[in-house]
Image (tube, grey):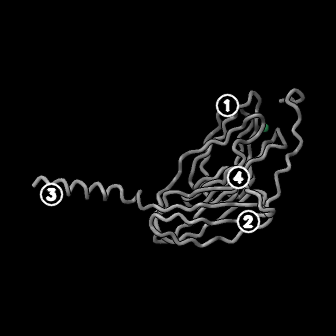
Amino acid sequence: MLMSRHAVTLSMLALAVAPIAGAASIQAQVRDAAGKPLADAVVYAIAGANIAAKARKVPVAVEQIDREFVPYVTVIQVGTAVTFPNRDPIMHHVYSFSPAKSFQTKLYTGNSPEYVFDKPGVVTLGCNIHDWMIGYIAVVPTPFFAKTDANGAARLPDLPAGAYDVQAWHPHQKSALAPERVVLETSSSPSVSFTIDAPPRKPKYKPPLDRMKY
Ligand SMILES: [Cu+2]
């Protein structure tokens, strides 16, 4: 009697943890044309039709710090809300003319309004006051995304088994890449690598702060 009750409890526990234990992941390595690790590349996986994908729409902030957008590259799922907090003691005027999301927040300090990015695509951010300020938001139609670190590495965790098209993008890329087809077994963790011909950022002239009007 006691043993069978114990057995039931254990099997229920096994069921409850099964989806996490069985999840797969993808390790991505991105390099530039010279073979060097490429940071700030976006890697995302488009799931096959029969894969249940939970939305990942945690609101994000793209800050302005020391007259730069931080982070330089942001990746979000379509439908995510974004704010643009200005942490500087001077005003910024953030805008985008990109088709995926066009908006502007006129001269302000502190918090900005919240904008929902409801279309996939690349959004280029600028500031009307500070010509050199530039940032990017990649709006992707999937909850499975990551950004490469300084070693050019990115990991897509907690993926249900199935087929995916894995895509890489970088704001400096000279041409678009073809996706890599990856078929994930339960608990597997395959690696994919991408080479993106993306020259380093060439920052525009940024005048010293004491010469600025704003
Ligand atoms: Cu500015």
Quarter of the image for the C terminus: give it: top right
* Image location of residue 4, percent across then percent down: 15, 57
Vertical arrangement, residue 101 with respect to residue 105, above or below: below
Label 2 CA crowd tier, 10 Å (few <14, some 14–19, many 20+): some
Q: Classify mark 4 as within 8 Å of ligand 1 or not, answering yes or no.
A: no
Please indicate, yes or no, whether residue 102 appears anywhere in the rendered image.
Answer: no
- Residue topped by disc 3: 4
| Helix, strand or loop under label 1 | loop
User: Residue 194 is drawn in which quadrant?
Assistant: bottom right
Q: Amino acid at mark 2?
A: Thr
Image quadrant occupied by the N terminus: bottom left
Residue kind at label 1, given as amino acid type: Gly
Residue under circle 4? 40
Label annotation for residue 110: 1
> Going by the image, does 198 lie left or right of 79?
right
Report the amino acid beneath label 4: Asp
Q: Could you tell whether 165 is left or right of 72 in the image? A: left
Residue at image location 35% in from the left, 55% down from the top: 17
Q: Which quarter holds ligand 1?
A: top right
Measured in 3D between alpha carbons, the distance from the residue under mark 1 to the one under mark 4, in whole angstroms, is 26 Å
Give the camera-side residue of 86 and 178.
178
Q: Nearer the viewer, residue 75 or 212?
A: 75
Kindly identify the residue that appears in the image at 59 percent across and 60 percent down. 27
Q: Is residue 105 left or right of residue 81?
A: right
Query: What SS does tag 2 mark?
Result: strand
Q: Considering only order in the chain, which callout, 4 or 1, is on the residue closer to the N terminus?
A: 4
Which residue is labeled 2 in the image?
195
